[in-house]
């Protein structure tokens, strides 16, 4: 099924099979659909064997970085220390709303995936960190956890396996940066959501300074299907031409598009078909002007670049952007790109945690310049300054929020420079900016 | 907006502060503490409880939480001011957050905000209407981009709000 | 050990050393703001980014551990450009008010900008403004100059273990905050002023007193308690205007307490004892030094009983000479020790404002001075009491007791009782050593000139000791110390040269040999 759009025949619903199916939300409904059977099997399996199946499947992290999940799990060794699993349900990347639907419609899918991942990394405790704005998903997942405890699926003796699996829902409080895994751990510990310097990596010293794995909601949901049907089955869902991107991926589509919503397709799906066929193309009577294919932090593509791309990690990279979180933001030909890039920069300036100099100061400065250009008070020199600031903000900070702010500026200026220039009055110089020169007052 | 403004303007200073964590709320906190190996980890949940009870997180609320979790009030304040969902001032009975980040912005979210500001009589972002019913703010990405424009009214998310649906939406609120 | 190359120089350091610290051993300063050797690493200012060969990105030198064979470039174009970028970001909202800023001249933002920053500003937008705030204690916060390095927050959190400061808000709205009603009242809070690399945290006491470049500085030891914190006495035109800690890993790391910092006004007092005086028919009268010494020696020589009351704030050198006078005359050696509340700095082992508010009671005890509570109680007419810089200990003088004052001032009961008054320097005006409560012997250096005919204590007491027949004594502090070190087994082998400016531990305190 689909939500809010009915499932398109060319989709490959695996994770999204029960979107829109209210019965799947309950424990009984989930079990009637085969739920928790694979968890029972996994709990009786050696974690290394579980890790290996996921390794073989080629499943990669769906939060944005695309790190192989089985490999990440295999960093966790049975060392006698307390291990933690964090589920990253802080979905905050503008343009992304897939985890929201996973949690709203199939909370038990998440709980089951969480329990499986916990077992695979020798953890007895898992925290599902859900962004505070997700009030309905929080309520759904909390209810699913409650049901799972009541049924003995979670707890001291999970499904009679003799193993302890505790799952707690932790509610965020409004901070995009908590989607960054080390910031998430700080937030969970009751701190400001500041990203941490790595090393130490979470697998060595993460949550509460213990070995920790952080997985995205979609990743652990996918893992249970891998374990249920096998690595080969999972790989068969995606284009055989690229063995590095396997299985299905949920793409969230939003902005100026005929049919916004979540779509699940096999990796390697042609982006042209995706945008114009599944999603219905631009709104009636309009044309696409620009597409951000992987959440707001990745480079902007032109429709032509998108039409030539396939939707997997490598395919979108080859087109000049990144798969990221799978949030596809569409801009039609009525949009003012300067205005929208300025708005995007404002998002990052608002969300900067304030730790690193380049990010704290650079994001806010970028906004001020962009808004001045937007308002017709820019100069040609501002464009160079923007690019130099962007360069100073890239690759120099603890996390990549700073880079993310610079990305749309750089790609926007590269691809839509004419729109910026059109807003700059001819022959305008610094001296003519109101307030900067008494002569201009 | 003053950066250092922390004056509890909705809380009469001469009234003694009634603790939040008594009875069932205290039991709730005690249960929360069993979920984490440190007391500090219960800070965000504890602050949520304060906000659920009082509608905002006052300086006294921060101090109460600090005492319960063996933290200092200054530490708690540093955390409270990091997270945008904790209200550091009292807000209207209906706290309206309109997403205006890019994906919603391209779908006309700014017009939706303006309609809310006009219809609620708030006029300005962050200002509470004279009757105390509404406070309207712009919010960064609510994670419901496919349902532009999403609006959160207190804990309820309303999808696909348009300029035309604002009036009806408000009519259903007390 | 790990061998790596930094700016073309090979260094060998223990594993786990940061690149920044390793660079120091190569004599290379990696510019930085948030890093401080006495604080946990934050890695947030991003000023210390360096180029490490084979690394994909620039690495923060403070948070990067050395690796075998690493080749580090601190001054490559890439690293310099990165620093230039950071400096530009730090300055865009900075008020550029160096002419009225107390930090100017000792400001790392100013220094690095001068060295490597842009010549002009590209920032055309309005600057951020936040009002100045009194943080309590001696600390003033000027947020417009703040670079959010968080040294102050980390100090209060981890070292003082009294987290009353925080980072409030986020993004470019962030500032250093505190909770209404809880001020910087910790006994060690003023360290945040020193730790602040810019002019954002200022000492209210020092505010507008002097420009940094007008100050003369001398290595000294804090006289306010027996911890022996290493400090710098800063003077302007011969007036002490500020006391700041001087790093010593074995004693006080980089810190000094507020009591010690602010206890300097007495050094500058104008109503000093400035000339030798001898009491005659008309009362006390100024006398030549030689006459005063002779008069004092005569009184001591003819006394039935002599008591030496010494201050435990005197130098070892002065106490040694007093001890020689006592040995010669059979005098009793006593001292009183003022006490106050103990105030530890929890994050540093064995660092505290000690209850004993005297810098050298250990040295005094080593030289045979015994603590008493009522030093004048047993005295009877005809006794001689030598009060060596211990005016505070003398509430009243029994009738007929002959008082010889060796001191910096004539206060209280001594003004009427003194038969001879011999003016001596404060610790700020002479060289000397103190022995702290753990037995660490540490030098202090002359920071300012004494007034009028005031002489160093070791010279005055040396002459007095000679005059009572205790032998001959040298005129240089270092030579007096050499005699002292030769006669006290616990100090054998110590010299000013080998004590240096970090001091050395004495052997267990023992009695002085003859």
Image: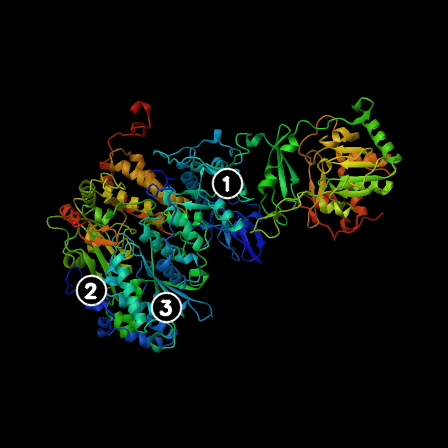
The answer, for residue A174, to whether it is visible in the render is: no
Q: Would residue C289 appear left or right of C179 to someone viewing this image?
A: right
Number of callouts in the render?
Answer: 3
Q: Secondary structure at mark 3?
A: strand
Mark 1 and mark 2 in contact? Answer it, CB < 8 Å.
no
In the depicted structure, whether residue B15 falls above or below residue C280: below
In the depicted structure, whether residue C442 falls above or below residue C119: below
Q: CA distance from mark 1 to mark 2?
A: 56 Å
Q: CA distance from mark 1 to mark 3?
A: 46 Å
* Label annotation for residue A166: 3
Q: Residue B95 at x, y = what percent?
A: 25, 47
Mark 3: few/some/many CA within 10 Å (<14, 14-19, 20+)? many
Q: Residue C247 at x, y = what percent?
A: 60, 45
Check disc 1 and report the residue beneath it.
C197
In the depicted structure, whether residue A8 falls above or below residue C250: below
Residue in the foreground of this view, choosing between C230 and B92: B92
Q: Would residue C205 appear left or right of C82 to someone viewing this image?
A: right
Instruction: Classify the position of the N terminus of chain C by image quarter.
Output: bottom right
Q: Would residue C425 appear left or right of A380 to someone viewing this image?
A: right
């Amino acid at each position: 099924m689909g939500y809010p759009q009915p499932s398109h025949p060319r989709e490959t619903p695996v994770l999204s099979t029960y979107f829109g199916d209210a019965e799947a939300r309950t424990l009984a409904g989930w079990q009637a659909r085969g739920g928790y059977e694979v968890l029972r099997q996994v709990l009786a399996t050696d974690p290394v064997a579980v890790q290996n199946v996921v390794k073989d499947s080629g499943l990669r992290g769906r939060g944005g970085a695309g790190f192989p999940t089985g490999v990440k799990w295999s960093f966790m060794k049975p060392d006698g220390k307390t291990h933690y699993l964090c589920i990253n349900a802080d979905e905050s990347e503008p343009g992304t709303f897939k985890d929201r639907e996973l949690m709203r419609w199939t909370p038990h899918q998440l709980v089951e995936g969480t329990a499986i991942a916990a077992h695979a990394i020798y953890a007895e405790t898992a925290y599902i960190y859900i962004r505070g704005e997700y009030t309905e998903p929080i309520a759904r997942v909390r209810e699913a956890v409650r049901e799972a405890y009541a049924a003995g699926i979670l707890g001291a003796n999970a499904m009679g396996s003799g193993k302890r699996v505790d799952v707690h829902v932790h509610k965020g409080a409004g901070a995009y940066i908590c989607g960054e895994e080390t910031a998430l751990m700080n937030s969970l510990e009751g701190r400001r959501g500041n990203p941490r310097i790595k090393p130490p990596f979470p697998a060595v010293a993460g949550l509460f300074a213990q070995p920790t794995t952080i997985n995205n909601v979609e990743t652990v949901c996918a893992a249970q299907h891998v374990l249920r049907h096998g690595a080969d089955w999972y790989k068969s869902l995606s284009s055989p031409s690229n063995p590095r991107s396997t299985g299905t991926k949920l793409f969230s589509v939003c902005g100026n598009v005929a049919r916004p919503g979540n779509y699940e397709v096999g990796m390697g799906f042609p982006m042209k078909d995706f945008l114009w066929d599944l999603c219905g193309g631009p709104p009636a009577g309009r044309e696409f002007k620009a597409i951000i294919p992987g959440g707001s932090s990745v480079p902007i593509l032109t429709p032509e670049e998108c039409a030539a791309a396939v939707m997997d990690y490598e395919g979108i990279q080859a087109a000049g952007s990144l798969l990221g979180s799978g949030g596809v933001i569409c801009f039609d030909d009525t949009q003012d790109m300067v205005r929208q890039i300025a708005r995007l920069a404002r998002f990052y300036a608002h969300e900067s945690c304030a730790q690193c100099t380049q990010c704290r100061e650079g994001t806010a400065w970028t906004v001020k310049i962009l808004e001045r250009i937007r308002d017709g008070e820019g100069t040609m020199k501002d464009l160079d300054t923007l690019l130099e600031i962007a360069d100073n903000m890239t690759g120099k900070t603890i996390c990549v929020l700073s880079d993310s702010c610079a990305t749309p500026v750089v790609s926007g200026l590269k691809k839509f420079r004419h729109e910026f220039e059109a807003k700059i009055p001819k022959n305008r110089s610094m001296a003519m900016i109101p307030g900067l020169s008494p002569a201009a007052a | 907006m003053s950066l250092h403004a922390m004056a509890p303007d909705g809380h009469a200073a001469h009234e003694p502060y009634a603790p939040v964590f008594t009875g069932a709320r205290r039991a709730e906190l005690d249960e929360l503490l069993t979920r984490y190996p440190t007391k500090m980890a219960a800070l965000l949940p504890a602050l949520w409880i304060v906000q659920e009870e009082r509608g905002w997180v006052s300086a006294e609320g921060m101090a109460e939480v600090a005492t319960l979790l063996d933290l200092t009030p200054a530490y708690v304040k540093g955390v409270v001011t990091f997270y945008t969902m904790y209200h550091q001032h009292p807000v209207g009975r209906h706290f309206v957050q309109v997403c205006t980040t890019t994906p919603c912005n391209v779908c006309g979210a700014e017009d939706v905000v303006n309609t809310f500001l006009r219809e609620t009589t708030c006029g300005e972002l962050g200002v509470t209407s004279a009757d105390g019913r509404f406070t309207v703010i712009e919010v960064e990405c609510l994670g419901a981009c496919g349902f532009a424009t999403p609006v959160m009214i207190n804990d309820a998310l309303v999808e696909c709000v348009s300029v035309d649906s604002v009036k009806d939406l408000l009519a259903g609120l007390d | 050990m790990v061998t790596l190359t930094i700016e073309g120089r090979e260094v060998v350091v223990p594993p786990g050393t940061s690149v920044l610290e390793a660079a120091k051993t190569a004599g290379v300063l990696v510019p930085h703001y948030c890093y401080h050797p006495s604080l946990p690493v934050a890695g947030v200012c991003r000023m210390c980014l360096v180029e490490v060969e084979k690394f994909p990105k620039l690495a923060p030198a403070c948070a990067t551990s050395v690796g075998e064979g690493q080749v580090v470039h601190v001054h490559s174009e890439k690293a310099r450009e990165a620093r230039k970028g950071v400096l530009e970001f730090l300055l865009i909202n900075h008020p550029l008010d160096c002419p009225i800023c107390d930090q100017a001249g000792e400001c790392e933002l100013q220094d690095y900008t001068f060295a490597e920053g842009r010549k002009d500003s590209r920032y055309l937008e309005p600057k951020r403004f936040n009002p100045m705030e009194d943080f309590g204690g001696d600390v003033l916060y000027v947020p417009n100059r703040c670079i959010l390095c968080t040294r102050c927050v980390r100090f209060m959190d981890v070292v003082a273990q009294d987290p009353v400061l925080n980072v409030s808000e986020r993004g470019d709205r962030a500032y250093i905050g505190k909770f209404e009603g809880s001020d910087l009242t910790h006994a060690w809070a003023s360290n945040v002023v020193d730790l602040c690399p810019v002019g954002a945290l200022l000492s209210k006491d020092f505010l507008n007193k002097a420009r940094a470049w007008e100050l003369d500085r001398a290595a000294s030891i804090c006289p306010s308690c027996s911890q022996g914190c290493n400090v710098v006495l800063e003077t302007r035109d011969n007036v002490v205007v500020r006391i700041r800690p001087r790093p010593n890993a074995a004693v006080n790391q980089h810190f000094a307490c507020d009591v010690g910092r602010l206890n300097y006004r007495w050094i500058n007092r104008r109503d000093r004892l400035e000339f030798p005086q001898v009491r005659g028919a008309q009362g006390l009268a100024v006398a030549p030094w030689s006459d005063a010494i002779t008069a004092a020696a005569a009184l001591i020589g003819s006394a039935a009983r002599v008591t030496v009351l010494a201050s435990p704030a005197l130098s070892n050198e002065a106490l040694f000479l007093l001890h020689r006078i006592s040995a010669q005359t059979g005098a009793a050696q006593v001292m009183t020790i003022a006490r106050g509340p103990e105030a530890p700095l929890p994050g540093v082992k064995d660092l505290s404002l000690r209850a004993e508010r005297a810098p050298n009671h250990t040295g005094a005890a080593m030289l045979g001075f015994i603590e008493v509570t009522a030093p004048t109680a047993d005295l009877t007419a005809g006794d001689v009491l030598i009060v060596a810089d211990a005016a505070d200990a003398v509430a009243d003088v029994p009738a007929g007791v002959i008082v010889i004052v060796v001191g910096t001032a004539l206060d209280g009961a001594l003004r009427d009782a003194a038969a001879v008054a011999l003016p001596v320097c404060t610790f700020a005006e002479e060289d000397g050593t103190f022995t702290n409560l753990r037995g660490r012997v540490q030098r202090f250096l002359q920071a300012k000139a004494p007034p009028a005919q005031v002489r160093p204590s070791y010279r005055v007491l040396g002459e007095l000791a000679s005059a009572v027949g205790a032998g001959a004594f040298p005129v240089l502090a270092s030579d007096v110390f050499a005699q002292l070190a030769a006669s006290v087994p616990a100090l054998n082998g110590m010299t000013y040269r080998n004590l240096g400016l970090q001091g050395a531990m004495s052997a267990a305190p023992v009695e002085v040999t003859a």
